[in-house]
Image (spheres, grey):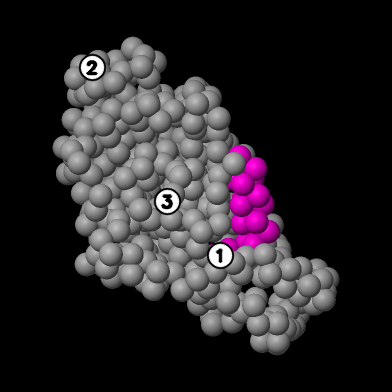
Amino acid sequence: MSNIVIVGAQWGDEGKGKIIDILAEKADYIVRFQGGNNAGHTVVIDGKEFIFHLLPSGILHKGKICVIGNGVVIDPKSLLDEIAFVRSKGIKIEGNLFISDEAHIIFPYHQRMDSLREREKRGKIGTTKRGIGPCYADKVSRSGIRVQELFDKDSFRDKLKINLKEKNKIFKCLYGNKGFSFDKIYNEYCGYGRQIKKYAANTTLLLNRALKNKKSILFEGAQGTLLDIDHGTYPYVTSSNATAGGACTGTGVGPNKIDKVIGVVKAYTTRVGEGPFPTEFGPELMQVIRNKGKEYGATTGRPRRCGWFDAVIARYSVMLNGIDEIVVTKLDVLDDLEKIKICVGYKYKGKIYKDFPTDMSLLKYSQPVYEECDGWLADTSVIETFSGLPDNAKKYINKLERLLLARVSMISIGSERKQLINRRHG
Ligand code: IMP
């Protein structure tokens, strides 16, 4: 298999977990490159559901090497809990999991800062409160603490002391919050350091050596393109590059080593948290699709906001990521609808915009321009081939291909591995 990057082409939760699990079969290495335990990648095998927050979704495949790259932010407690869970299912981790020693560590003060900021009405993003933004902020301001620093007790002590002094002052002065005791965090995190040391490695070297030895890598994106810190619906975004370029910076692999980018979209659109969402459903349809699609966050359990497929954002994603192939998931969720709409532009102050705007107020105040398709009113969850799909479902997929300027290579029609229409060659 070639080296493939998988990205979400909407606001996350596109069903990437299942697609990564399927493609992982042919890959040698599966690598997470950004985000942290804000992600929730769901894989269902024989009715059993596995949700991964930090571990690459390929971990369920025997003999695959799973890597957490330098671009990821790691909550060590969450990671160790996940390792223990996977091990309890009889899956071997030792020798199969490597964590970049350059990845940044999430501390309790990051989580608390995230929660306190979210409490303020103004500027609320609707984050997962996992401390992701504050941890990346420390990384960028060059005061972050990396995995390797947990192994050097003296340097860790010094850095943590400086950080905590600053953070506790902010907690006290800005939020009237009493902050954290140094000893408690220090001892707890030295303990985590001891437990994760055996997985820590120079993963940049590991991956580049693997490439030299003709091994193939699957890069597992988390969140989605519209949540990208640079290109998403800022400020209602996450704090990392969820777009394909993040696969290079978040692993230390050069762009010329990437052979293909696959973008995953849902057959409709969802988003969690605050921020503009032009095609959002009214309350009635929201409830129908939320129930049928089980649209509740895999990490926080929050109900997801649901809406019609937005071809403007999906085409923007195709362009931004250099997407070669599209995977459409959850087509079956639309099975019972008589009419299905696709947004093909935004109307704002009498003008129609066909391209994704950089001005977020335009997105917020515009009206979606829809094209309507006839529904297929048939059960697609049991269909195995593209030609077996009802005519109107085929037309819907063909229309998406025309609007997105990309080929739909797979269609997922349920959560199980076998519920997949595969049109890929090789
Ligand atoms: P944060 O990543 O926790 O800082 O949250 C920032 C925004 O990204 C919020 O709107 C979250 O709901 C959203 N978000 C973060 N991770 C995911 C995800 O895995 N799926 C969908 N939305 C996410």
Magenta-drawn stretch, dominant element (helix, strand or loop)? helix
Question: Residue, x 62% and y 65% (percent of image)?
Answer: 196
Magenta segment boundaries in residue numbering: 73-89
Mark 2 — residue? Answer: 388
Q: Secondary structure beneath disc 2?
A: loop
Q: CA distance from mark 3 to mark 1?
A: 15 Å
Local packing at callout 3 (Cα closer than 10 Å; few below 14, some 14-19, many 20+) is many
Vertical arrangement, residue 394 with respect to residue 126, above or below:
above
Which numbered disc flags the more N-terminal residue, 2 or 3? 3
The amino acid on which the numbered mark 1 sits, given as a three-letter code, is Tyr
Mark 1 — residue? Answer: 199
The amino acid on which the numbered mark 2 sits, given as a three-letter code, is Gly
Local packing at callout 1 (Cα closer than 10 Å; few below 14, some 14-19, many 20+) is some
Task: Please indicate whether residue 213 sits to the left or right of residue 286 in the image.
Answer: left
Is the residue at mark 3 in contact range of ligand 1, meaning its CB lies under 8 Å from it?
no
Residue 104 pos. (x, y %): 56, 71
- Of 125 and 252, nearer the camera is 252
Can residue 306 be spotted in the picture? yes
Q: Do callouts 2 and 3 mark residues in contact (Cβ within 8 Å)?
A: no
Q: CA distance from mark 2 to mark 3?
A: 34 Å
Which numbered disc flags the more N-terminal residue, 2 or 1? 1
